[in-house]
Structures are given as C-alpha cells and as structure tokens.
Image (tube, coloured by chain):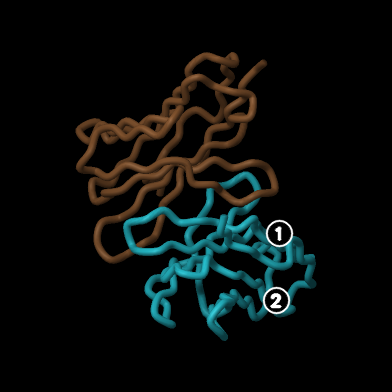
C-alpha cells in the first residue's frame, strides 16, 4: 500500500545547481507533509514541512512546493552542496488526532563537487 | 541542541529472546513514537504514545511488542520473543504537539540470529 511514493530512487546533481526531489501521494486525507534527510547509520533529520493549506514554504536553501490537485510535492535545494548528499524522505501526516507519519521510499541525492 | 538518544546502537540477539530498546526523548515533548526500517525498505510506523498510553499502533505492532515510559525520561520498546524478521533499524522519535515535526534518534540496529 504505497500511499506516499518517491519514484526516483536516486538523483545526481552538480554542486551549485538546483536539486528537485519529488513525491506523490494518493490519500487526500493527508494534511501535513514533511521532508527528512537521512545519512547512513543515522536517524532521519527534519528539514522542512508544509501544511495542506499552503502551496509553498521556504527555509533558507530549501523550498517545498505542494500541489494538492495533483497530490504532488517537491523539495527544491538551491544551491546544492556536497554536504546535501543523503537519502531524502518525504512523509505525510493524516488529518485528525493521529500523529502517524507515512514515509516514502526515499531518494538518494548525490551532489557532485 | 536537544536530541533524542537511543541505546544501544547495535543489539544482536538470538531468535526467541526478549530485547528492550531504550530511548530518551526530548524533554518537553509530549508524543513519543517507534518506527522501524527493514534494510532496503521504507521507514514504517510502529506505535505512538501520549499521556502514558498507546494512542495508535500499526498492524506490525502485535502482542510481541510493548512500550513503556517507566519514568519521566525513558521510553522503551520491548519485543518479547524475537523473530528473524524483526531484524531492522528501530528509530525512536518525539514531537511537541500533533502538528509538529517529529525528531528522530540515531536508531538501534537489531539483528536477530
């Protein structure tokens, strides 16, 4: 049951360029979305989030865009840095009292110097 | 910066043995979680805990699993009789309120042999 999908298992980008990571979801009950970064042998680290009432949220080099009609969100990293190389997960939160996160399968970003 | 800490970082156990994974969530957080990631798969929700009781659990969280907050700082996951398929990275997480980001620990790698 893949309610949150990240169709690109990997992405390679040159340092200084834009990285765009994509995520699609199927459940219209999701109302809050998060991006996490994960290095090997570490836990996921929160990056940025967006509520379903917004279509964009920006924090420094990171911007998340949400297109509710398409059930699609994307994370833009500008400019990309070698230290950004990691696995990126999008996660979705159901509406209501539950605080369960549904994670995508992740995209491995490699930023080449 | 406050962080979620987990011990041990790696646990090897024989099939059928009981294991307890330990976590110290961020001190002013109210919601606590366990997630797991089987090698090569996505991060999966196991259980959430609020106000000293389970608020939600997944179908993975069967009678072999239990959680406890034995004092004001620790949060534990117990697996009563481990199976080979319980081998995974187990992540503890905590959050302040329902619609806020969850902060994850570095994980415990459980290997059942």
Q: Colour of chain B?
A: cyan
| Above or below, comparing residue A94 to residue B47 in the picture | above
* Chain letter for mark 1: B
User: What residue occupies the far bottom of the structure in this picture?
Assistant: B70
Q: Position of residue B20 (x, y in %)?
A: 67, 76
From the image, tell me which residue sits under label 1.
B109
> Within the image, what quadrant is residue A96 found in?
bottom left
* Chain letter for mark 2: B
Q: Position of residue A76 (x, y in %)?
A: 42, 26
In terms of secondary structure, where does tag 2 sit?
strand
The Cα atoms of the two marked residues, 1 and 2, are separated by 12 Å
| Above or below, comparing residue A89 to residue B69 in the picture | above
Q: Colour of chain A?
A: brown
User: What residue occupies the far front of the structure in this picture?
Assistant: B1
In terms of secondary structure, where does tag 1 sit?
strand
Q: Is residue A15 left or right of residue A32?
A: right
């Amino acid at each position: 049951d893949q309610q949150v999908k990240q169709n690109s298992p990997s992405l390679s980008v040159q340092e200084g360029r834009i990285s765009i990571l994509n995520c699609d979801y199927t459940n219209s009950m999701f109302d809050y979305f998060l991006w996490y970064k994960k290095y090997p042998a570490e836990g996921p680290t929160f990056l940025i989030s967006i509520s379903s009432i917004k279509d964009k949220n920006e924090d420094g080099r990171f911007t998340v865009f949400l297109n509710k009609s398409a059930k699609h969100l994307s994370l833009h990293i500008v400019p990309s840095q070698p230290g950004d190389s990691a696995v990126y997960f999008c996660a979705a939160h159901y509406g209501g009292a539950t605080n369960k996160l549904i994670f995508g399968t992740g995209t491995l970003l490699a930023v080449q110097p | 910066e406050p962080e979620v800490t987990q011990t041990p970082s790696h646990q090897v156990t024989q099939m059928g043995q009981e294991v307890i994974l330990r976590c110290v969530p961020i001190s002013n957080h109210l919601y606590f979680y366990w997630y797991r990631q089987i090698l090569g798969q996505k991060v999966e929700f196991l259980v959430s805990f609020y106000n000293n009781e389970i608020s939600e659990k997944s179908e993975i969280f069967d009678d072999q699993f239990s959680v406890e907050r034995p004092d004001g700082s620790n949060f534990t996951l117990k697996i009563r009789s481990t199976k080979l398929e319980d081998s995974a990275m187990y992540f503890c997480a905590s959050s302040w309120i329902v619609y806020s980001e969850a902060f994850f620990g570095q994980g415990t790698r459980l290997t059942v042999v």
